[in-house]
Amino acid sequence: MRSSLSITRVLRRSIEVAIGLVGLIGVSTQAMEKPVNRPNILFILTDNQPASIIGTYGNPEVRTPNIDRLAQEGVQFNHFFAVNGMCSPTRATLMTGLMPSQHGIHNWLDDRQMANWPRDWSAIAEFRTLPVTLRHHGYRTAMIGKWHLGQPWEPSLGYEYWVTLTIGHTVDFWDNEVVDNGEVKAIRGRHIVDYFTDKAVQYIENYEGSRPFYLQLNYDGPYLNPPTNAGPAKNRFYKEYVGKEFKSFPRTAFNENMARQLLEDEKHDPFVVEKIFEALMMHNDPATMANVASQNTLVDDGIGRVLDALKRAGLDDNTLIIFSSDQGNFYGQHGLWEHTVMTTPSNLYETAMNIPLIFRHKGHIKASRKTDALVAQYDLPATILDYVGINDVEFPNSPGRSFAAQLDPEKAPEGRKSVFFEQEETRGVRTDRFAFWMRIEGTGEPELYDMKADPEQTTNLYGRADYAAIVSGLSQLLTDFFERYSDPQYDLWKGGTAKGSVVRPEMFKRLYGDKWEPQTKILPKFSPGEEGTGPKGAEEE
C-alpha cells in the first residue's frame, strides 16, 4: 500500500503537470527556460568547518559517518580553498564566483550594524548569482539555514522558499528566531541545526517533482566559536566525547599575537578583545574540545537524516549532492581559536583556508575517489552550472572556471597551478608547493611556507636569501591576479571601501583618512540576461 505521503506527491505532480507552466509561481515569465531533464541539486554548506576536523579528511577522533559516506559514494577534493577566513565574504563568493575585492564583502556583516542597514538590503543583489541563474533555467530554489548576506526578512537572489535566522552569526544554538517564508518564529529548546534539518526534510518530502530543485542547506554549525562552543555542551552527542584525549587538537601555548592584543586592550575594539579573551578560555580546555567535536557530529547526524529523506522520496539517484563549508576555524593550531582576523595582521593559515568539498551523484560520478587538484570557491558556481548543462551564461569578471571535467576520472585534467585568497590587509596565493602572503605596506610582513617540508606552517621562510626568487615570483603572481580581479571601489589595497563592516576600521582610516567608511548602498538588482558590472578579466593561465 502506498503511503499517504506518496499519494500526496502523485496528486500534486498530476495537478502541476495539468496546469503546465502556471506552476512557476512568483517567477518572471520573461525568457524563462522550459524545464529540461536536469538533476536536483542539494548544496549542504556548514559553518566554520575545516577539512581537518572531518573523519574522511583524516581526523581519527571526530565522528562524521554520513559525511564520510558521501565521500565514499562520490569525489572528495583534498585541496579546496576558501577565498577568505570569514563567513559573509565566502558565502558571497559561492553565490557570485567573485573575489571579495570584486563583490565588496571583506568581513562578516556585523549584526551590531543591522539597524543602520536599509530594511531590504541584500549585499550582492547587483550581481549574477547561482540561485537566480538556476531559477531562470527552470529550477525551484530554496534556502534553509544561515544567510548572513544582508537583511533576512525577504527572499533574496532568486530564492522562492526561504527559512533563515533573523541575525547573521550564532549567539545561541538553543534560543533563536527565524523567518519562515515571511513569518517570524521563535525556536526555543531545540538545537538550531536540528530545526534546519527538519525543514530540509520537510521540503524534500513535499517536493512535487514537476521541476528540479536547488536546495541550499546552510547549517549554522558546527561553528567552533564562543560562546556556543566554549566549555560543556548540552547536545545529545556531547557525552560521547567527554574524557577523550583529543590528540587531533593541538596542545600549544596560546598565540603570542593574540596575547599581546589582550595586554594592549585599550588599542583595540572591545568586541575583538572580548573574543580574544574567550579564545584564551577555550584554549587547551577538554570540555571545549568535547563540545566542538560533538557539534561536528550533530551536523553530520542532520546530514544523514536529509540523505535518508532523499532516499525515501526516491530522489537519491537524481540528486547531485555537494558538501562544503564556508571556511574553517582554528581549534588550537598555532595557539589560535576562532577566525583568521583574530591576529593582527590577519593570517591565512591552512586550517582556516583548506575546507571540505565532496560531490556525489549516484550513477553519474564515480565513487570512492579522492583528488589533490587545486580548486577554489570562485570555481564552484561555474562548475555547478556546467555540470547540469547550463552553458549559455557566465559570471562576469569571475576568476572562476569549471572543474566539472575533473569529476570524470577518465577526462580529469590537472587542477589549477595556484589559488588565491584575501583577508582585508592580507592577500595570499597557494601553489602545490608554497603558501605565500603579502600585506598592505605598514600593516605587517610577508610570510612564506613550504607546504611539502612544513605542512603545519611553523617556519616562515620569508627573508631567506635562498628563497628570494620564489618570493619574487609569487609576489608577481599575487599582484597580477588582483590587478585583474579587483574592482577599484572595493579594493582595500588601493583606498577602496567595503560593504557592511571590517574588523579594524581604524587601520583603514589611518591608511586612507578619517572619511573612509564601509557602505551599505542598495544597488540596482541584477536581472537574468543583463551583463555584470566591474572590470573585465581574463581567465588564469
Image: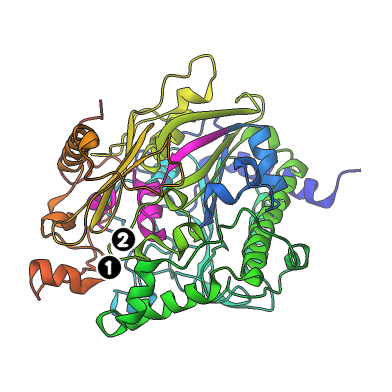
Front residue of 392/70: it is 70
Residue 228 image point, x, y percent: 57, 73
The amino acid type of the residue labelled 2 equals: Ser
Q: Nearer the viewer, residue 443 or 416?
A: 443
**Residue 10 x/y as whole percent:** 74, 43
Name the residue nearer the viewer: 285 or 491: 285
User: Which one is closest to the eye, mark 1 or mark 2?
Assistant: 2
In x, y percent, where is residue 94?
40, 47
**Residue 88 inside the magenta-drawn segment:** yes
* Mark identifier at residue 262: none
Q: CA distance from mark 1 to mark 2?
A: 12 Å
Q: Nearer the viewer, residue 65 or 94?
A: 65
| 519 to the left or right of 15 | left
In the picture, which quadrant includes the N terminus?
Answer: top right
- The label shown at residue 502 is 1
User: Do the residues under discs 1 and 2 have CB atoms within 8 angstroms?
Assistant: no
Which quadrant of the view contains residue 269?
Answer: bottom left
For label 2, the crowd category at 10 Å Cα-Cα, with few meaning under 14, some 14 to 19 and many 20 or more, is many
Q: Residue furthest top?
A: 410
Q: Amino acid at mark 1?
A: Val
Residue at 57 percent of width and 68 percent of height = 284
User: Which residue carries the number 2 mark?
Assistant: 346
Sequence-earlier tag: 1 or 2? 2
Left or right of 415 in this view: 363: right
Residue 155 belongs to the span the image colors magenta: no
Residue at 67 percent of width and 41 percent of height: 68
SS for callout 2:
loop
| Residue range of the region highlighted in magenta in the rendering | 76-104
